[in-house]
Amino acid sequence: MPTAEVTGAKLAYRVDGHGPDLVLVHAGIADMRMWEPLVALLDHRFRVVRYDMRGHGETTYSAGESSDADDLAALLAALDIDTCTLVGASFGGLVALDFAAKHPERVERLVVIDAPLPDHSWSEQMTAFFEAENSAIEAGRVEDAVQLNVEHFVGSASSEVKALVAEMQERAFRLQLELEPEGPGPEPQLSAITMPATVVMGENDVPDFIAIAHRLAEELPDATLECVPRTNHLPALERPEAVAALIVSRR
């Protein structure tokens, strides 16, 4: 698998297809494998770029502060991508928002799927989930933490989706236990995101993320809100054809 050298890391990535550049940023519970079904639907219309962030998949990295938005900028530079359609899922959606706010001239269109926001007031349900996850990790019960995430975020998805998410999440946990990526988290300035944006939410996602999707649709200067029926937190993996249609329809 090819890698792009950035400060303190080698980002694993893949490029498929030909056409306008479409860049995909995976969820925090996943890695670039979550995009496989979507890529198969779009690589005849786009040059599709996906990669593993630090602490995920096949990317390797050393100790030291880093920024996911800076890593993305370095990857685009390495691939000679001046502008693109940028798609981010969950934490990858937050990274995409941060990148779009910092580099609006490089994003023609933004698609954000079930993203968090750093200033969101989390519900008791989500707070309890975070506490249970942290307790399991601190006790060395990685498998329990994985299952918590699978049931919480894709509990009603197919067995194939749940198995893949479990595999990707376990890989991420073990990488991050060995060496946690350092640096401040993304804090996007929403008013700076002036390009057309599509905010996507899964119909059956955790209520906090549905609330954030509505907030993003209201606060982003040029945004539309779309709901993907019968999906949880990862619509692009659960119903890739529906997400592909949203990407194509808004070109």
Image (cartoon, rainbow, N blue to C red):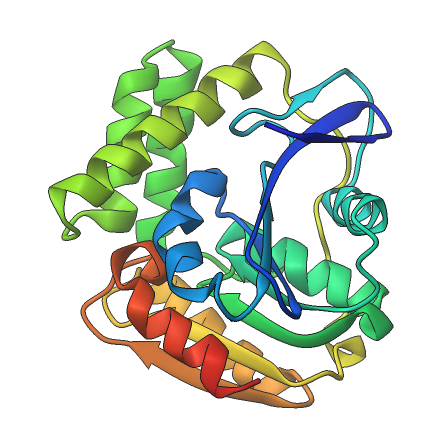
Q: Which residue is drawn at 65% across and 83% down?
A: 220
Q: Residue 14: in sight, yes or no?
A: yes
Q: Nearer the viewer, residue 116 or 72?
A: 72
- Residue 52 coordinates in the image, percent (x, y): 58, 36
Residue 232: percent from the left, percent from the top?
26, 59
Q: Residue at x 47, y 65 (%)?
A: 113
Q: Looking at the image, which is closer to me, 162 or 12?
A: 12
Q: Nearer the viewer, residue 119 or 2?
A: 2
In this rendered view, identify the residue nearer to me: 171 or 203. 171
Which of the 4 quarters of the picture holds residue 20?
bottom right
Q: Residue at x 82, y 46 (%)?
A: 70
In-image side of 192 versus 190 (left or right):
right
Q: Can residue 30 be seen in this view?
A: no
Q: Is residue 38 above or below residue 159?
A: below
Q: Give the left or right position of residue 225, taking residue 216 as reference.
A: left
Please identify the quadrant where the C terminus is shown: bottom right
Measured as percent of width and height from the top left, residue 46 is found at 57, 66
Residue 204 horizontal/vertical position (percent): 23, 66
